[in-house]
Amino acid sequence: RGQICGACFELRCVDDLQWCIPGTSIIVTATNFCAPNYGFTAEGGGRCNPPNKHFVLPIEAFEKIAIWKAGNMPVQYRRIKCRKEGGVRFTIDGSGIFVSVLISNVGGAGDIFAVKIKGSRTGWLPMGRNWGQNWHINSDLRNQPLSFEVTNSDGLTLTSYNVAPKNWNFGQTFEGKQFEA
């Protein structure tokens, strides 16, 4: 369900002297999920099948660690703390009594474990994970300022009060506080 979305990783190309660029690495943020294709074995084209782990990179990023003609390359990776500019971003979507919030630009652990939302006329309400870092709730929160409580996978909680003003609209993005990296 995309729980690792937002986490940061350092990648190095390994085991191929012909195609790897020695001494280089890149830092990436996990942003998507590759669905398995069980019509193929994990070794025979089902690159997204368990237990495989993989990173799909834009060519510009791939070319920093390997020669582009190499195609699929083995990489060594390690999870690292995310360093982000500015605060955590909250993009509010939905309609009527359905509110969906995409949370991005999360520093520190990068991935989110739990989210609560609070309007000026409500207490703290737990949100459910829709997928990745999209969180939702069935509640009419229009015409009231919104606050967010975000808990990351390290167990740290960050509270940003009155992030969205009373007159917020669906489709808008607001910035709150930031986790320390």
Image (cartoon, grey):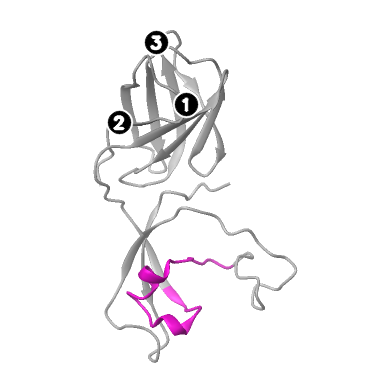
- Dot 1 surroundings within 10 Å: few (below 14), some, or many (20 or more)? some
Q: Which x, y percent locates residue 85?
A: 24, 45
Q: Which disc number belongs to residue 170?
A: 1
Specify the quadrant of the image occupied by residue 17. bottom left
Foreground mark, 2 or 1, reads 1
Q: Is residue 44 above or below residue 4?
A: below
Amino acid beneath label 3: Ser
- Dot 2 surroundings within 10 Å: few (below 14), some, or many (20 or more)? some
Which secondary structure class fits the magenta region best? loop
Q: Which residue is mark 3?
A: 120
Q: Reading the chain from its start, which is encountered first: label 2 or label 3?
A: 3
Q: CA distance from mark 3 to mark 1?
A: 17 Å
Q: Which disc number belongs to residue 158?
A: none
Q: Which x, y percent locates residue 23?
A: 27, 80
Residue shown at 39% from the left, 38% from the top? 155
Q: CA distance from mark 2 to mark 3?
A: 17 Å
Specify the quadrant of the image occupied by residue 87. top left
Q: CA distance from mark 2 to mark 1?
A: 17 Å
Amino acid beneath label 2: Gly
Amino acid beneath label 1: Phe
Which region is colored magenta? 52-75
Q: Is residue 172 above or below residue 41?
A: above
Please report contact status of discs 2 and 3: CB closer than 8 Å, yes or no.
no
Q: Which x, y percent locates residue 54?
A: 51, 67
Q: Which residue is mark 2?
A: 176
